[in-house]
Amino acid sequence: MKSINLLLFSFLCISAYLNGQENREVTILKDHWKFTKGTHNGAIQPDFNDSDWQSISLPHDWAISGPFIKGGDGPTGKLPWKDEGWYRNKIHVPQHYKGKQVYLLFDGIMAFPKVYFNGAFVGEWDYGYNSFYLDITDFIIPGSENTLTIQVDTRKHDSRWYPGAGIYRKISMIAVNPVHVDIWGTYVTTPIIKPSYADVRIMTQVRNASGAEEKIQIQQTIFNQEGKLVATKESTALVRASSAKEVEVTIPLTSPRKWDISDPHLYTLTTTIKKGKEILDVYNTTFGVRSIAFTADDGFHLNGRRVQLKGVNLHHDHGPLGAVFNKRAMERQLEIMKSMGVNAIRTSHNTPAPEVMELCDRMGILVFSEVFDKYDGKMDFDPEITNFDEFSQRNIKNYILRDRNHPSIFIWSVGNEIGDVSWNIDNGFHRLHTMLNYVNKYDPTRPTTLVCDSEASAALRHFDYYDVHNWNYGRRYTLARKLEPNKSVIISESSSTVSTRGYYDLNLPKTKTDFSKTTLQVSSYDLNAPAWAEMPDDDFMWQEEDSYVAGEFVWTGFDYLGEPTPYHNDWAKENGLTDAHASYSSYFGIVDLVGIPKDRYYLYKSYWNPDQTTVHILPHWNWEGKEGTSIPVFVYTNGDCVELFLNGKSLGKRCKNPTSTIATQRYRILWDSVEYAPGELKAVAYKEGSVIGEQVLKTAGEAYQLRLSPDRKVIKSDGEDLTYILIEAFDKNGNPQPLADHQVQFEIKGEAVIKGVGNGNPRSYEPFQASTVRLFYGKAMLILGSQYSEGKVTVKASSEGLKSATTIITIE
Ligand code: GAL
């Protein structure tokens, strides 16, 4: 077992994180940060004493550790995110940076960061979800310690969900020669794609920050995914002093392998800037060759064939990790969604971390990329005082330039449910046009859209400005489609069904808004939704009937922090309760806040993945005291019929009814009333007369033992990798105990840290950063993170009265 000295490794991370390319050094400013809240203007000065500030690593979200503000604002997560925060770091700038051009690239800071370097103000940003960069060349002192100070202020930020607080995505320091490829400085498109060749058009923005004109050569080399050189071309350019020049070439690629959801093949373009024999810069761009098209009547086409979009909306937070971006946490989200049949995500309603697109490119997931949410006082933009043109140009420019080479992105959305824009209030169409113009200016190769919610606004024909109809809920696309049948339709938000994992109210709701007033949990029979929304089954049915619909994006894939509809603060007041009764996280997710599937996961899986066997019974079968009373039983399956058995006795065979006008009867198999008796409930599923699979639920005895199931038993010692360890309670015979609510303690032996715990209960006020968690309906999650050491880590979970459980994680 090898163990690396922790200090040495942190140093490596800060000062020598090279991306392996000559003449371009990228340092991730991850460790050795100091942080505090409050007003500390003196902290701008390099000699300020920050020794009593908290030592932290980035990315960081100061609010996620809580404590929860019980009577606080439910819609934004009841966490202390509204404040001022200060970050400081002493950075060693190497001597050889003298004469270099140095930038700081910020992936996202919530919100309104002001950046100071060695005591001088360098620049600022507003929109907390966007990436931006600053040129610090004139501020650095090479060969010595430099001070970076960042002030963050979320007090001016407003939100409809939990935004997070602080430097929640990474910061990179980039050092290059005066002649270099600009940040986000390449643009690769494939205007011609034929089976035997594709034209790859490459635009490179070369910057010359020196005082003299430079004549340079630009070598463009394309490698396939196996690393084989497949095409190369060299051109020359004269770049004037202190300016930038766009250099364009077209390179034919023979027999291109397409990027597709089933085979996401990626090419790498290496751009080398040379002056004679001297290499000035090497810059890599990943791209794919693929065609996208929306048709009037046949939905969306990828590489010439129809692909129905099976999408989910995802918010930016990662549950117990808060807004902190972690690549593995994101990869896991996407893996869970993909396992259900998802082939697309919508980044609702803001620019995500850049790694999200890298992952989607690699995993073959299409991306509906969105830049803004409705800005009625909820965004970092005040229509009264901000110059809209300037704000949108700057923000759309960074949004598009950063991401336009990703093959996974198939549409750009300028915003979600922007009221004044859809209703043309106060010259709203002018603003819509402004945003779309900027998108088209920076990338004319993808369709554009606006996401709408008010059906009647279609009469004003805002869709004349953009390419694809996008409507949220309730078949509201109907009028727009009637008025403009030449445009395809996406259901940009579907369903919005709400439920709590593991919780069932045996009296089925009479209406979709019939929510429990006592438990403040939503029954998991998947029949509840807010007034504006619907069941998953409705959207399935509408898409089958309206074959022009290109697909749907379910609200939402994962539960997220904030927006706890229906149990928000207003609901509490209307029902004679106080804010303290409101919940703090959403009930919309197909999986809960920690990624544990709710029943709905299996409904989507059964429909979206018809070739995989799904047989899923709900509810659980532990109803002590309900013997002889009637219990509704639903089965989600990709089969067409199910025979149900209770304690060996058949309760008959029932089938889906594909022609029913009641959507739930088409996609679920229902028994409204099964007389409860403890024991064994078994569903045997059939497809076209043959058995395809079965599921058995057994009434569990008392909880007896814990079990730990890590999603990965081996993780990397990079200080970032994670394993998600599921904790479950079982009875003596190994049956899952669906009602267990024991408090579980963790003991970690070895070099790993608890990054978070949670149980998916939208009303739990237990901290997310703790070494204990309460089981919620039999389950909870521990998120364990590696440090910079290799070795074995033993995780022990114990709870009074239960047999403890242990698992070993290898860190290498
Ligand atoms: C939509 C909105 C989403 C979310 C959702 C909840 O109208 O675009 O952000 O609030 O409602 O159903």
Image (spheres, grey):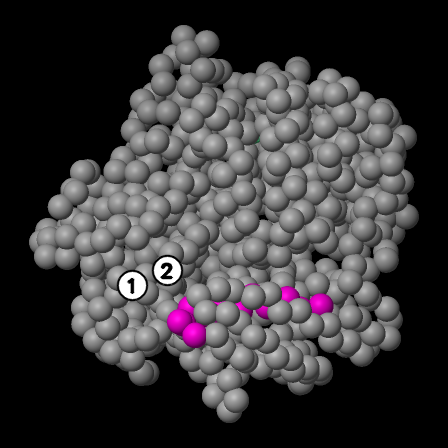
For the point 33% across and 49% down, which residue is it? 123
Q: Quadrant of ligand 1?
A: top right
Circle 1: element type: helix
Instruction: Tell whether 541 sits left or right of 445.
Output: right
Q: Nearer the viewer, residue 680 or 656?
A: 656
Whether tag 1 and tag 2 are in contact, CB under 8 A, the answer is yes
How packed is label 2: few (under 14 Cα within 10 Å), some, or many (20 or more)? Answer: some
For the point 31% across and 83% down, which residue is it? 2
For the point 74% across and 21% down, which residue is it? 460
Note whether 603 is above or below 9 in the view shown: above
Q: Amino acid at mark 2?
A: Asp
In the image, farthest residue toward the bottom:
277
For the point 47% across and 80% down, which residue is it? 280
Q: Which mark is residue 475?
A: none
| Residue 209 within the magenta-colored segment of the rendering | yes
Residue 572 location in percent, x, y? 43, 15
- The C terminus lies in quadrant: bottom left
Looking at the rendering, the stretch of residues picked out in magenta corresponds to 201-212
Q: Nearer the viewer, residue 3 or 371?
A: 371
| Residue 642 within the magenta-colored segment of the rendering | no
Q: Which mark is residue 135?
A: 2
How packed is label 1: few (under 14 Cα within 10 Å), some, or many (20 or more)? Answer: few
Residue 506 location in percent, x, y? 60, 23
Q: Magenta span: helix, strand or loop, mainly?
A: strand
Residue linked to disc 1: 138
Instruction: Tell whether 744 sits left or right of 352.
Output: left
Residue 58 location in percent, x, y? 32, 57
Per the model, the C-alpha gap separating discs 1 and 2 is 8 Å
